[in-house]
Amino acid sequence: EFLAGYNIFKEAMVRRFWSRQPHSQIRPLLLQKLYPYIKDLATGGSYLNAFFGEGLTDTGSPFYSHAVRWRNNSRTKRFFSSELHADLAGAASPLDAITLPEQFHTWHPLHQAQYLEITIFLSEYLLSSQGDRVGMAHSIEGRYPFLDYRVIEFSNRIPAEYKLRGLTEKFILRKLAARWLPEEIWRRPKRPYRAPIHRSFFNAGTLETTLELLSESKLNQTGYFKPGAVTQLVNKAVKGAKLSETDDMALAGMLSTQLVHHHFVDHFHIPEPLGAGDDVKVVVDSRVIH
């Protein structure tokens, strides 16, 4: 995030470059160099142009860099029940909750994109659900070298061209690594870790639980999603059909929601508070302390 190490930053820069000549047939070809780990995306052609071209010239928007991602994620709403849509109809836009620094509009576009990624995605999601909550639940304090405050302060003072040089991400880190690492390592393209979402939940070990959570009866009980639409997607996954990126995202979101409801609505138990004379046992190094 702090050294522009993700494709979303390249995507935003390519789209801005393309927006200066929106009718160019050459400039959007750069999009084919992004997301090499998403199968068939590089050969998308007209599909890529249409997908990334929506809102292309809206470069004055403070959310320009993330508009494509947010629009893509919103496709999951097609599974929302009519009741949920009704409840959300009068709700304020999530964008209204985003507070931007006073000088945000004067920043380099890359720094604007980094701010959104760091304050919304990194801190509120990644470090929460995949970092601090997991660690603290087991009395472990996570320490992340690249998130050391001195590294962050230094990175925030670096000009944009030292972070993203052309389509080379983490440019200054690569130059530093070249002192000690072989070229095939420090020049290596970005390789994200990706979870095999539907394969993780539609296999012999997890299928029964997955089908139960996404069953028509459970969906009707929780009321968040359309049973018919969900059932179609579930059948597609069970048959081993190819699922799109948005299908995988939808499955992850719906399963997460159903699990949260199961554990914290249907089966949430608040223990009785301890009384003055209650005996409290604490286990320390296998020793029980009263």
Image (cartoon, helix red, strand yellow):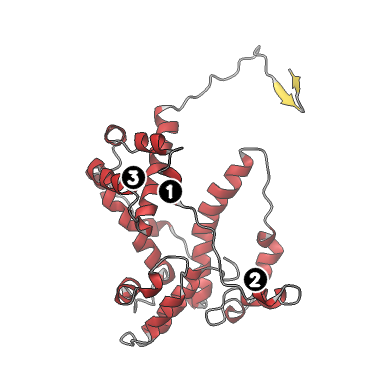
For disc 1, the neighbor class at 10 Å (few under 14, some 14 to 19, many from 20) is some
Q: Is residue 35 above or below residue 227?
A: below
Indicate the amino acid at tag 1: Arg
Q: CA distance from mark 2 to mark 1?
A: 38 Å
Give the residue displayed 41% in from the left and 68% down from the top.
63
Residue at the disc numbered 1: 199
The quarter of the image holding the N terminus is bottom right
For disc 2, the neighbor class at 10 Å (few under 14, some 14 to 19, many from 20) is some
The mark nearer the N terminus, 3 or 2, is 2
Give the residue displayed 60% in from the left and 47% down from the top.
132
Drawn side of residue 110 relative to residue 182, left or right = left
Asked whether residue 211 is in view, the answer is: yes
In-front residue for pair 218/155 = 218
Give the residue displayed 28% in from the left and 32% down from the top.
217
Q: CA distance from mark 3 to mark 1?
A: 10 Å
Indicate the amino acid at tag 3: Val
Label 3 close to label 1 by CB (< 8 Å): no
The mark nearer the N terminus, 3 or 1, is 1
Identify the element where label 2 is drawn: helix
The mark nearer the N terminus, 2 or 1, is 2
Residue at the disc numbered 2: 155
* Rendering quarter of residue 264: top left
